[in-house]
Amino acid sequence: MTEASPLTSFTAEAADFLTGLAADNSKSFFEAHRDQYARAIRQPLEDLLGAAEPVYGPGKVMRPNRDVRFSANKDPYRTEASMWAGTVGGVYLNLNRERLEVGGGLYDPSRDQLERARTAIAERPAIAAELESIIRALEGDGFTLAGPSLKTAPRGMDPSHPAIQLLRLKHYAALRGLPIDTPPSDVLSTWRAMEPLIAWVDTHVGPALTTRAH
């Protein structure tokens, strides 16, 4: 699917389904409303995934079922819905009962990714300045950095380093909250605003070679 192809918008029906599921998180509720889930939530997510993958790389729509094997919470279903597409950095959308959260970048990097990013920031001022400029532009455009950051300097890093705020980052991702009924074209333009950060991640961090950092 290309950007020019028709995309399905989210509507109040999606919020109604998630509200009902939060009140009755059971298989019987989900099965009784499966058509509503497919129409109001799954199809718009699949449409957006189809638009995202040719631009940002392979992705997926998250399954509605929760993995409850090691969780004290045994509710069988997620009360939010999301999708992701990308290679190293990518784009993301999460739908909850109140709004969309749209953004991207690199969330929860692996240990080697975090080490490479911090080394680049600490040792190459131009790379740090590029990231700082990207972040300022995103924040000025209504995005919020995914957080939280470290409260102190990373181990082995100088607390007085001029780029210490960047060195304390644990994620290289940002999100913007949007109304549920935001037109798909606005979701796509929000993703386009993320492209400088995605490019920074792809260039200066690269793919994961080890497990996640935390």
Image (spheres, rainbow, N blue to C red):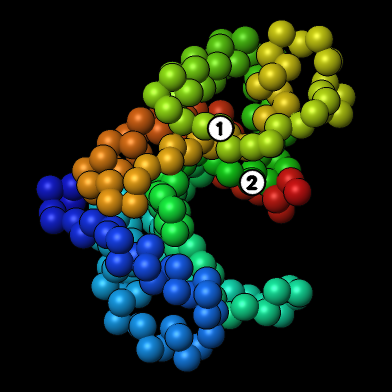
As drawn, 41 above or below 149: below
Q: Position of residue 195 (x, y in %)?
A: 38, 32
Horizontal placement of 53 versus 211: left or right? Answer: left
Q: Which residue is mark 1?
A: 145
Amino acid at circle 2: Asp
Q: Position of residue 15 (x, y in %)?
A: 38, 63
> Residue at point 48% right, 38% down?
175
Mark 2 near mark 1, Cβ–Cβ under 8 Å?
no
Local secondary structure at mark 2 = loop
Q: Position of residue 163 (x, y in %)?
A: 68, 14
Q: Earlier in the sequence, mark 2 or mark 1?
A: 2
- Residue at mark 2 to residue at mark 1: CA–CA distance: 13 Å
Q: In front here: 114 or 190? A: 190
Q: Which residue is mark 2?
A: 108
> Which label lies toward us, 2 or 1?
1
Q: Position of residue 118 (x, y in %)?
A: 70, 26
Local secondary structure at mark 1 = strand
Mark 1 closeness class: few <14, some 14–19, many ≥20 residues within 10 Å: some
Horizontal placement of 168 versus 126: left or right? Answer: right
Mark 2 closeness class: few <14, some 14–19, many ≥20 residues within 10 Å: some
Amino acid at circle 1: Leu
Q: Quadrant location of residue 153?
A: top right
As drawn, 173 above or below 16: above
**Which part of the image, by quadrant, shows the N terminus?**
bottom left
> Residue at point 28% right, 46% down?
182
Visible residue check, residue 166: yes
> Residue at point 43% right, 37% down?
176
Q: Which mark is residue 161?
A: none
